[in-house]
Amino acid sequence: MFYKIKALNEKGIKIYLHCFEYGRAHSKELEKLCEKVFYYPRKTGLLNNLSPLPYTVKSRISDELVKNLLGNNFPILFEVLHTCYLLKDERFKNRFKIYRHSNIEHDYYRHLAVAENNILKKIYLNKEADRLERFEPIISNADLILAVSTKDLGYFKKNYPNVKSVYLPSFHPNNKINIKEGKGDYILYHGNLSISENYEAAFWLIKNVFSKINYPVKIAGLNPPETLKTEIDNPDSNRGKHIELIANPNDEQMNSLIDNAQIHTLYTEQATGLKLKLLNVLFKGRFVLCNDKMLAGTGLNANESLFICNSPNEFIKTIELHFNLKFEKTLSTIREKQLENFSNGKNVERLIGFLEHY
């Protein structure tokens, strides 16, 4: 969302940003990019979790938000389902309303529940998935749906045929291909390790791939669970000798890890939305290995530096074939061609075109 705001600002579009806060400091950078930023407290707590509405929606209902939105007649971009409570509000009936999704939310939450080991979190995620599925038809009140993948586009066209749906990939930090030529000396897996989808992927890779090879491996991300640390440091496995866990790297460290890795391994059990870390490593990283669910709905195909690996043996063999190869300039040229549909510049022009038809 930040890079969407940045791209719109660079094209001279004035943005009034409404966001809910719960602990983070106000952003001076966002305030520079927007005409005005409105902040609202998120109403967390048990009572809001007892509502038939999704907790993520109920905790973002605000009379002050309604008042501020009614202060003008601009188009409204609702970012993800959590923000969509006002889509059915009669006071906004004549406003141009865009729904921007990131995942099919009830599917996403159910997958998180499957991967979650904490029983209370698992119960919450399953309950929230049910509520999100019941709530989702509210998007039939939108005038336009922006889908982040062609797979999800098909879902919206089938389930909400009366609303125009178009494919518009996610915005991201990269304006051009910037991949180091030559060779790195480690394999990288990265992600927000506090999210069950990501730490379960890390466990799968450690157990099935990383423990079967002798090349250096770095696993990096936010707030890794103790169980992941234990899995790597298990003295009976000798994994700690070639697998390194890097907890909570800052932006500079993370960018350096991505830039200098020889091979990036990506794995998911959720074929939902668009994985932003996939885009990041394709714009910045050398050889990329991922399973087919990671690419679902992206239109991306395997080539000389992007490999689809769906089994441990496929990961291991591909690592062995490419760990000692140099990344040549010709591969960057191929990657650049491959990523044309993910240009922020082109996609912001498309978004502005939708607004101009309002």
Image (tube, rainbow, N blue to C red):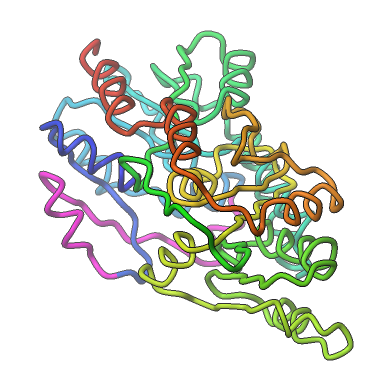
Q: Is 51 drawn above or below residue 166 in the view shown?
A: below
Work out which residue is located at the far bottom of the displayed protein and give it. Answer: 235
Number of on-image labels = 0
In this rendering, position of residue 19 left or right of residue 306: left
- Is 273 in front, or is 295? 295
Q: Position of residue 127 (x, y in %)?
A: 71, 51
What residue is rendered at 75% in x and 86% in y?
Answer: 233
Q: Position of residue 151 (x, y in %)?
A: 62, 24
- Is 65 in front, or is 301? 301
- Is 47 in front, or is 65? 65
Q: Position of residue 149 (x, y in %)?
A: 55, 28
For residue 172, which quarter of the picture? top left
For residue 310, which quarter of the picture? top right
For residue 291, which quarter of the picture? top right
Q: Which residues are magenta?
A: 25-51
29 magenta-colored? yes
Q: Is 268 drawn above or below residue 342 in the view shown?
A: below
| Rendered-image quadrant of the C terminus | top left
What residue is rendered at 16% in x and 62% in y?
Answer: 28
What residue is rendered at 69% in x and 38% in y?
Answer: 271
Q: Position of residue 65 (x, y in %)?
A: 27, 45
What residue is rendered at 76% in x and 58% in y?
Answer: 115
314 magenta-colored? no
In this rendering, position of residue 315 left or right of residue 193: right
| Rendered-image quadrant of the N terminus | top left
In this rendering, position of residue 51 left or right of residue 202: left
